[in-house]
Structures are given as structure tokens and as C-alpha cells.
Amino acid sequence: MSDPNEPTTVTPQLLRQWGLPDPGDSKKSRGTAMIIGGSPLSAGAVVLAGEAALRVGAGKVAVTTDAAIADVVRITLPESGVYESPGADEPTPDVLRIAYDGADAVLVGPGFDDPEHAVRWLRRLAGHDIACLVVDAFAVGAVREVPRSDLPRSLIINANLDEAELLLGRPVDDLFSDLRPLARELDAVIHCYSAVVAPSGAVWRLDVGGPGLGTAGSGDVAAGTITGFAARGLDPERAAVWGAWAHARAGDRLAERMGLGFLARELARELPAAVLEVEGARRADG
């Protein structure tokens, strides 16, 4: 009998068993993702996250970003609708509020260059009827600045090791055992490197991925991948597991062909092939 405290290793067989939602016959049936982030210092983060969400099958992606870079995003990611972020003291425009309330998953954080900006955005979103909220980068540390009861019921935290330690308030000793009580405390699914942990105590281990994932923008791709799966209708636990595995497997595929020096934009483009490894085998078995 397996130990319930031991992590479940994520395999293509597990993902095949879980499957993915039926894509339906239009982009509307595949869900809408909203990406909120970006700054003049990091205009590419929202582009990487938005492309990743589309590459794993989300039907539509909208981006909300700093007005100074909005036109850059419009040109670089022509498949998305682009909104301009209101100023710190400005109310949220109705058109933007309707857009994120209507999204199937909202990602906040990629590319922000100021922790206070992330806090302001979480406070803007507090109390709204958002189906699933994914937080990344500076927004991870901002989670504790907003009462948990004000945030959406479905919350996914995509953290790197530094951000996980910020949430813990100390260095990580063991990723799996340290994240389990944190996920329970924050009532959130947490993805950090090779671990995905749920508030229920369930833990999944990723044995894919390698040093090539340690490249600028890789975390933005991971966050967008998870958000894309959440937008398609997966519950937060499965969206995080599917997204973390697809991101890591895309890195393995690139490393097999190119070695270490692949780019985050190439990770996003490799995602459909990584997902097809699972879905293609599932259709063949069926």
C-alpha cells in the first residue's frame, strides 16, 4: 500500500488518465485567460505568458499592461486583446472589470517591476467573481497583503524558490514537506519547481525538466501554461500539474535537440508538442 504522505510522481500515464476538457467547436468553448502584468523594464513577460496560454489550447487571451508598452504587446502578440492598466489612483474602467470578471482564469504578476504594483492589482481584484486566480512573480509575495477571504476561492501560486521562502519566512529545507502546510494555510495550490502541492495535502513530484529551464522568462511561460489549462476548465490542482509538467517536458524536448541554450520563447512554442505526447497517445489507445 502506498504512503499517502509520499508525493505522486507525474507521468504521461497519469495525465492521460486525467485527460483534458473537450475543446468543443470554437474558441469560446476553450476558455478565456486574462494576463495582468508587464512594465517598461519587462515588456516581454506578458507576451510569453499569453503565448503559453494559447499554446496549450486556451481559446482567447487578453492582456492588461502598462500603457507605455501596450502597443508593443499588441504588435508582438497580435492574437490577444490588450487593455491599458489604470493609474494607481484611478478607478478600474468598466470595460476592464467586465473583461477580467468574464475570464475563466486570471494571471497576475508576470513582468511587474514594483511589489506595490502587484499589491494594488490584487486589491483591485479582491471581491470580484473570478473563476481562478494565478499569481506569479511579485504577486506571490503580495498574496499576504490581501485577506484570503477577499481573493477568489480557486487560487494557484506559481513560485520560484526565493518566492516560496518569502511566503514561508525562512529557507526551504524540503520542498515537499515545507509547501504542504503553506498550501493549507493559504488555501492555495502551490507550484514550485519540481513540486505541486494542494491545500488537501496532496503532493505531486515532477521528474521532468532540467537546467535549461533556468533561463530568463521561463517562469512567465510556466505561469501562462498553468493559466491556459485553468482557462480550459481544469480544476486548480490539475491545471497546476498539467502546466508544470508541460512546461518542464517542453524544456526536455528542446534540450534533446539543442542542448542548454534554448530561450523561453522557444519553450512556449514547444508546448503543443509536449501536450501532444500525452493527448496523441491517449487518442491512439482509445
Image: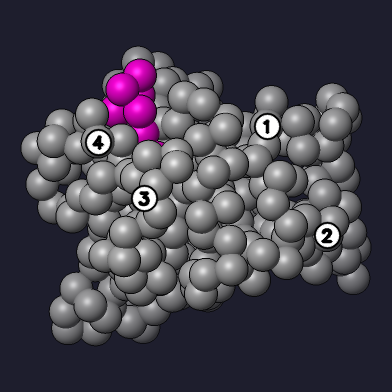
Q: Where, by quadrant of the figure, is residue 86 drawn?
A: top left
Q: Is residue 208 left or right of residue 3?
A: left
The answer to whether marks 4 and 3 mark residues whose Cβ atoms lie closer than 8 Å is: no
How many other residues sit within 10 Å of disc 1, few (<14), some (14-19) or many (≥20)?
A: some
Instruction: Please determine whether, in this image, residue 152 is positioned above or below residue 75.
Output: below
> What's under tag 3, amino acid-wise?
Ile
Which mark sits nearer the N-terminus, 4 or 3? Answer: 3
Q: Which residue is the site of mark 3?
A: 35
The N terminus appears in which quarter of the rendering?
bottom right
Task: Look at label 1 and name its amino acid.
Answer: Glu
The residue under label 4 is 67
Q: Residues within 10 Å of mark 2 (few under 14, many from 20)?
A: some
- Dots 3, 1 in contact, CB < 8 A: no
Location of residue 68 in the rendering, given as x and y in whole percent from the top left corner: 23, 29
Q: Marks 4 and 3, Cα distance to the nearest angstrom?
A: 14 Å
Dot 3: what SS? strand
Q: CA distance from mark 2 to mark 4?
A: 37 Å
* SS state under label 4: helix
- Residue 217, given in percent of the width and then of the height, sits at 40, 28
Q: Residue at x 36, y 34 (%)?
A: 38
Write the start and end of the magenta stretch as one range: 36-43
Q: Position of residue 229 (x, y in %)?
A: 42, 63
Q: Amino acid at mark 2?
A: Arg
Report the residue marked by disc 2: 184
